[in-house]
């Protein structure tokens, strides 16, 4: 019986030991993915900020601007694209909506971001756009890959439609969470006139006809939880200028600041994001660490127990295991 029990334990030991690397290197890459229906909202504030006054074409200071960023999963579109490309795809319909201190819209830029649900790499498909213009992204945007590494990544900047490295700057502690800090600087670049402008009568076409150009630069900062690849905090030092053309003739300048400020995530959204990322981190660790190491430890324990039972089954001199001597012949 001991020998049979030992063989059963040995079989289970082999099973759980083999399951350990399968869970980490086979199951995890296939099970860990962004859900197609995910919805996320983030609110940032700029205190103070500089805005252009279109009535005078002069910059003015305001106490605060509010930036509302939403990411909404488009399940119907993702299913259509998945049928064509043959892999799990997420489609995010994003919107950056900027509101002034009076509650009126300052600007808004819609965006459609299509990416691989497992790796976060962009997927090029019909509908990929920024502010109504078709684009072809290279690099990540919004989210880093699962198990983010301590290295630079190619990051897509939607405003300038360019991709540049976002640099790993070290490991830090943010609200009790170990994070990787990344930073990217987009140098002054000419960008498209936004499709939605806050003043009636001024359209992108009318601005282009004046010969006035929009230029943009930003310093982008992210604190990323490496297990999930999700940013827990972010900041952006943003500046846009209008340069040249007849639109600025009355201002007495050849360029004027259209928008400038240091955007930071609002405090209540920081707490919400940190709590959300902590819960997601536990799920990822379950597949990458807890279960693989747990199965390996269980396999080792079962193997040890199987060897102990096997050794006991071979031990001589135990009751019930002594050989019965053959009867000797009796002489008459």
Image (cartoon, grey):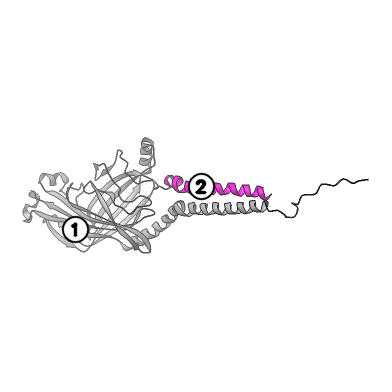
Q: Is residue 36 magenta?
A: no
What residue is drawn where x is 60% and y is 54%?
Answer: 305
Asked if residue 170 shows in the view, the reply is yes
Residue range of the region highlighted in magenta in the rendering: 1-29
- Occupied quadrant, residue 252: bottom left
* Near-viewer residue (55 or 234): 234
What whole-number distance in Å separates the C-alpha atoms at marks 2 and 1?
54 Å
Residue 122 lies, in percent from the top left, at: 31, 43
Residue topped by disc 1:
260
Mark 2 — residue?
A: 19
Instruction: Report the residue at 85% width, 47% height from top.
Output: 328
Place of residue 161 in the rendered image (x, y in percent of width and height, measured from the top left): 22, 46
Q: Earlier in the sequence, mark 2 or mark 1?
A: 2
- Residue closest to the far right: 332
Determine crowd level at label 2: few under 14, some 14-19, many 20+ residues with C-alpha closer than 10 A: some
Residue that appears at 15% across and 50% down? 214
């Amino acid at each position: 019986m001991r020998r049979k029990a030992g063989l059963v334990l040995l079989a289970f030991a082999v099973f759980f030991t083999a399951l350990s690397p399968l869970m980490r290197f086979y199951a995890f890459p296939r099970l860990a993915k962004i859900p197609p229906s995910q919805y996320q909202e983030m609110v940032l504030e700029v205190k103070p900020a500089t805005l252009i006054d279109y009535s005078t074409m002069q910059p003015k200071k305001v106490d605060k601007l509010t930036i509302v960023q939403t990411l909404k999963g488009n399940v119907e579109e993702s299913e259509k694209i998945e049928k064509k490309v043959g892999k799990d795809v997420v489609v995010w319909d994003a919107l950056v909506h900027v509101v002034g201190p009076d509650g009126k819209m300052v600007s808004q830029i819609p965006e459609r971001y299509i990416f691989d649900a497992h790796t976060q790499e962009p997927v090029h498909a019909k509908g990929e756009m920024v502010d109504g213009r078709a684009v072809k992204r290279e690099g990540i945007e919004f989210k880093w890959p699962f198990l983010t590494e301590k290295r630079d990544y190619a990051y897509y900047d939607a405003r300038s439609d360019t991709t540049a490295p976002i640099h790993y700057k070290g490991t830090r502690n943010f609200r009790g969470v170990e994070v990787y800090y990344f930073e990217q600087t987009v140098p002054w670049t000419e960008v498209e006139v936004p499709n939605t402008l806050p003043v009636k009568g001024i359209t992108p076409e009318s601005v282009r006809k004046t010969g006035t150009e929009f230029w943009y630069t930003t310093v982008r900062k992210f604190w990323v939880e490496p297990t999930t690849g999700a940013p827990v905090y972010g900041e952006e030092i943003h500046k846009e200028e209008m340069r040249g053309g007849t639109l600025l003739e009355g201002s007495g300048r050849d360029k004027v600041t259209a928008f400038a400020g240091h955007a930071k995530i609002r405090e209540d959204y920081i707490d919400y994001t940190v709590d959300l990322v902590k819960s997601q981190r536990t799920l990822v660790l379950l597949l990458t660490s807890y279960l693989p190491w747990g199965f390996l430890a269980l396999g080792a324990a079962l193997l040890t127990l199987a060897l102990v039972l096997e050794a006991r089954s071979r031990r001589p001199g135990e009751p019930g295991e002594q050989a019965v001597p053959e009867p000797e012949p009796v002489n008459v």
